[in-house]
Amino acid sequence: MFTRFRDLVNFDIDASRFEFAMTFCADRVHQLVPSSQSDSIQEAKQTAQDLHSSDPSIVQADIIFECTGAPLCLQTAVFVFLAVLI
């Protein structure tokens, strides 16, 4: 039996994939824009904090799938998930 997640959020750096995500699975999408910052971990932490500020329900994730391979998306997903544990 298939059980749907209650809320599926898509993070991506490529906005062209949002339409696909919204059509097939995502309830919400957030475009992550990499900066030229040399400290990608700090950028990911800040991005996760910004996402939480703009969308507090983002930390209610039960599971996170990372499918882009983009460091910013992966690291941000980790920090969003860690916020659930704190």
Image (spheres, rainbow, N blue to C red):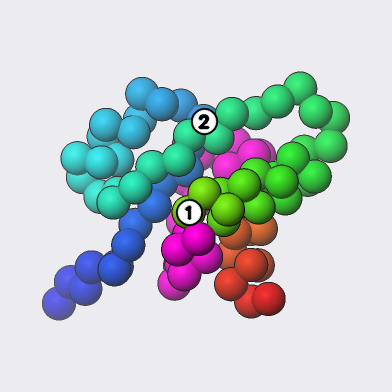
Classify mark 1: helix, strand or loop: loop
For this view, does 3 lie left or right of residue 32?
Answer: left
For this view, does 66 lie left or right of residue 23?
Answer: right
Q: Residue drawn at (59%, 29%), measured in percent from left and top?
A: 33
Picture quarter containing residue 5?
Answer: bottom left
Q: In this rendering, does residue 64 appear at all?
A: no
The amino acid beneath tag 2 is: Ile
Residue 13 is tagged as 2
Which of the pair 84/75 is nearer the observer? 84
Using the numbered discs, state the Cα–Cα distance from disc 2 to disc 1 in whole angstroms.
Answer: 18 Å
Q: Residue drawn at (41%, 46%), measured in percent from left and top?
A: 10
Pointer 1 local density, CA inside 10 Å: few below 14, some 14–19, many at least 20: few
Q: Residue drawn at (64%, 76%), measured in percent from left and top?
A: 85
Picture quarter containing residue 20?
Answer: top left
Question: Over which residues does the magenta segment extend?
Answer: 56-75
Classify mark 2: helix, strand or loop: loop
Q: Which residue lies furthest to the left in this view?
A: 1
- Place of residue 86 in the rendered image (x, y in percent of width and height, measured from the top left): 68, 76
Do residues under tags 2 and 1 come within 8 Å of each other at their CB atoms? Answer: no
- Place of residue 51 in the rendered image (x, y in percent of width and height, measured from the top left): 56, 49
Q: Which of marks 2 and 1 is in front?
A: 1
The amino acid beneath tag 1 is: Asp
Q: In this view, does 65 lie above or below 68?
A: below
Which of the pair 85/65 is nearer the observer? 85
Q: In this view, does 25 lie above or below 62?
A: above
Residue 55 is tagged as 1
- Place of residue 78 in the rendered image (x, y in percent of width and height, measured from the top left): 63, 58
**Residue 24 belongs to magenta span:** no
For this view, does 27 lie left or right of residue 29?
Answer: left
Q: In this rendering, does residue 14 appear at all?
A: yes
Residue 43 is tagged as none
Pointer 2 local density, CA inside 10 Å: few below 14, some 14–19, many at least 20: some
